[in-house]
Image (cartoon, helix red, strand yellow):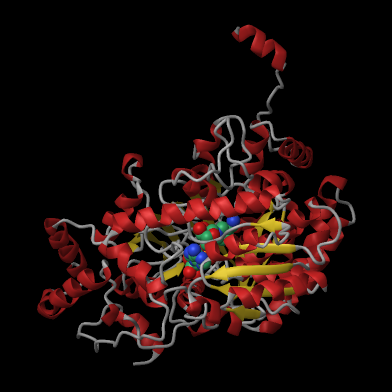
Amino acid sequence: MTFQEEILAGIPAQLPEAQPYDKEINHAPKRKDILKPEEKVLALRNALRYFPKELHQALAPEFAAELKTYGRIYMYRYRPSYKMYARPVDEYPAKSRQAAAIMAMIQNNLDPRVAQHPHELIIYGGNGAIFQNWAQYRLVMQYLATMTDEQTLVMYSGHPLGLFPSHKDAPRVIVTNGMVIPNYSKPDDWERFNALGVSQYGQMTAGSYMYIGPQGIVHGTTITVMNAARKQGGSPAGKLFVTAGLGGMSGAQPKAGNIAGVVSVTAEINPKAAQKRYEQGWVDELHTNLDEIIPRIQKAVAAKEVVSLAYVGNVVDLWERLAADHIHVDLGSDQTSLHNPWAGGYYPVGYTLEQSKEMMSDDPDAFRGAVQASLCRQVAAINKLAAEGMYFFDYGNAFLLESSRAGADVLKADGSFRYPSYVQDIMGPMYFDYGFGPFRWVCMSEKPSDLQKTDELAVKVLSEIAANSPEEIAGQMRDNIHWIQEAGRNNLVVGSQARILYADCEGRTKIALAFNEAIRKGELEGPVVLGRDHHDVSGTDSPFRETSNIYDGSRFTADMAVQNVIGDGFRGATWVSIHNGGGVGWGEVINGGFGMVIDGSEDSARHIREMLFWDVNNGIARRSWARNEAARFAIEREMARTPELKVTLPNEADEVLIRKSLN
Ligand SMILES: NC(=O)c1ccc[n+]([C@@H]2O[C@H](COP(=O)([O-])OP(=O)(O)OC[C@H]3O[C@@H](n4cnc5c(N)ncnc54)[C@H](O)[C@@H]3O)[C@@H](O)[C@H]2O)c1
C-alpha cells in the first residue's frame, strides 16, 4: 500500500502484521497498575470498540497483554508501516488543504526525531500525548483525508468523536484534552482515566499538534537565561548556569546557554536522551564522571568559553558536588518533568534509571518516598549555593511546588517560595504583560528556502516596527530581531520547517500579513501554518507559571484560557485546543492554543487580523485588570489605536485607607 492508500484505509479491515517492540527507540516507562479488575474489563472493552467483532478474538489477548506489560493499551500492531515525518502539504490525500496541513503537523509531532516516546504517541514531557493509541491516529488521519471545508472534526482527548457539518470559517478541528470534572483532577485520576482509554494529558503543544521540537522552547529559554544573566550585572561571558533535563523541551537549555553566551551544565540521567541531543548538536560535550566534569567547568568559566556541558547522571549528585566544592554558580534552575513526579518525570538520586522504572510500577509508594527524599537533598544543595550568591529560578516545571509538597526547605516564613518563578521575575513583567509571546510558524512546502524567506520577512517587519517602538518594548524588539537574524545560522530546525520568535500583537499581525501577501504573490511555495506555544500572554491560566505574576487573587481562575479558545474559534482559527494540565501538571493548569493555515487569500488576511488581535489582547486586558502596570500601558496603547476596543480599567485604591477601613 502507498502512504496515501494507508491513510485512506483508516483502520484496515484485515489484521495488520504484528510489529516487533523496537528496543532502539526511547519508550515510555511502564505506567502504574492502577485499574481494579472490573476496570480492566472496561479498559479492554473500550479498546475493542475501535475494531470489528471478527478481529476481537485476536486483539483481546494482545491488548490485555499490553495493559499488563505497559499499563496502557497502545495498540502497537496498528502503527503505520510508512515512515513518520511531515511531508509537503500537497502529498497528503485530502479534500481540504487546511486538513492536509493538520495531517502534516500531526506527523511532525510523531516524527521520531521530534517525539520523546514516538511509539507510545508521547511527544514530550514524559506523558504529553497526541493520541492515546494507534487506532485513534489512524481514524483521525482518515477523517482529515476525507473531510471538506464544510465539516469540523471533534476530538475528545485523542479520540475522534466524528465529523460534524459546519462552514468554511469554522475551525476544521476542535480539540479538548484532559477536560474532567474539577474534583476528579488528581494525578491518580489521570492514571485511571488514561488507562481506561477515556482521557489523556495533552501537555500544551503535544495534544494540539503544534509541537516543533526543542526550537519551540529554545527561544524562550534564551531570553530567560539572557535576562537572568543581565540581572546579575555585567556580561554573560564566564557566567555559569546549572540545570537539569535534556528531554523534549529541556533539551533546549544547552543551546540557549550557548546563544546567551554562558557556560552551561545540564544533568541528564537518561543516556539515550543525552546522546540524542548530543548527536543533534544541541549540547557540546557529554561527561559521565563528576571528577572529570568539575575541572572542565572550572576551565570553561576561567576561559569564558561559550560551551554547553552535559553531566550524564543524576542532577542531585551534581548539585551536591558543586555545593561541597563551593563552586560559584551564577544561575541555577531545573527542568526535570516535575509536572509528572510519580510516573517518570523525575528520577530520584541513588537509583539507576532501570531501578527507578521498576519501583515506579512495582512499588509506587516507595518510589514516591524516594522522589521526595531526593527533592529534599536537591533543595538543600541549591540552598547552600544560593547562600553563596547563586540566582535560582523555577523554570515552570513545578520544581518549587513539588519540593514544597515533599517537605523540602523551600518556603519563606510567610508560606511563599524562597525563589521566584521565571514568569514572576522575567517573562511576566517584561514579555507577557506587553503581549509578547511565542508566535511560531511552519512552512507547509517543507522547503528550507521558504523558511529562509519567512525569516527575512520577519526581520524586515520587526525592524520597521522597532524604528517607532516606545522605550518600554525597545529591548524586547532588539532581542527578537537579533534572534531571528541568527536563527538560520543556529540550525534550530528538527523535523518540519518551523520557526519561533516572541512578538506582540502588532508584530505577530504584521508578520503574518506579510507572509500571506508573499504566498499570494507566489514568493513562498506553499501555505504557512501559524500558531504558538500555549505558554503565552492569554493562552494559559497556571498559578505557578504563566499567571504567577497575577497578584489580585485571580491566578487560580481559568476564565482567560477558556475565553481565549472560544474567541479564537469564531475568529478564524483553523484548529483550536483546550487542555487540562500542561507544563506544571494535571489539575494545575488550563491552557489552550490554535493553529491557522494561511494561503494568501483575503479570508486568511481577515482571520489574521481578527483572531490574532483577540488572541493577544484578551490576556493583556486581564493582566491590566489585575493592576499589572506594563499590561495597563499596553492595553491603553492598543485602545488608542483601535477605537472598537473598550476595556474595563482598574482604579487604584489607597492602601492606608483600605487597612484603616478594615480595622
Ligand atoms: N518554562 C517553560 O517554558 C517550560 C518549557 C518547557 C518545559 N517546561 C517544563 O519542563 C519540564 C521538562 O520538559 P521536557 O519536555 O523536557 O520533559 P522531558 O521529560 O522530555 O525531559 C525531562 C528530562 O529530565 C530527566 N531527568 C529526570 N529526573 C532527573 C534527575 N533527577 N537528574 C537528571 N535528569 C533527570 C529525564 O530523564 C528527562 O530526559 C516539564 O515539566 C515541562 O512542563 C517548562
In the drawing, does residue 216 fall left or right of residue 1? right
Place of residue 62 in the rendered image (x, y in percent of width and height, measured from the top left): 18, 77
User: Who's the residue at 57% across and 63% down the image?
Assistant: 596
Residue 288 image-quadrant placement: bottom right
* Res 86 seen here: yes
Q: Does the rendering let one see residue 495?
A: no
| Residue 271 position (above or below residue 561) | below
The answer to whether residue 454 is left or right of residue 368 is right
- Counting from the top left corner in percent of width and height, residue 426 is at 71, 49
Q: Position of residue 308 (x, y in %)?
A: 69, 74
In the rendered image, the quadrant that contains the N terminus is bottom left
Give the camera-side residue of 102 and 343. Answer: 343
Count the labels in the image. Answer: 0
**169 vs 542, nearest the viewer:** 542
* Quarter of the image with the C terminus in it: top right
Residue in the image at 41% along x and 72% along y? 353
Residue furthest to the bottom: 1
The x, y position of residue 642, in whole percent, is 74, 41
Vertical side of 497 occupied by 344: above or below: above
Residue 463, quarter of the rendered image:
bottom right
Identify which residue, 630 or 172, lies in the foreground.
630
Instruction: Give the residue drawn at x 21%, y 67%.
Output: 47
Query: Of all residues shown, which one is farthest toward the front?
Result: 324
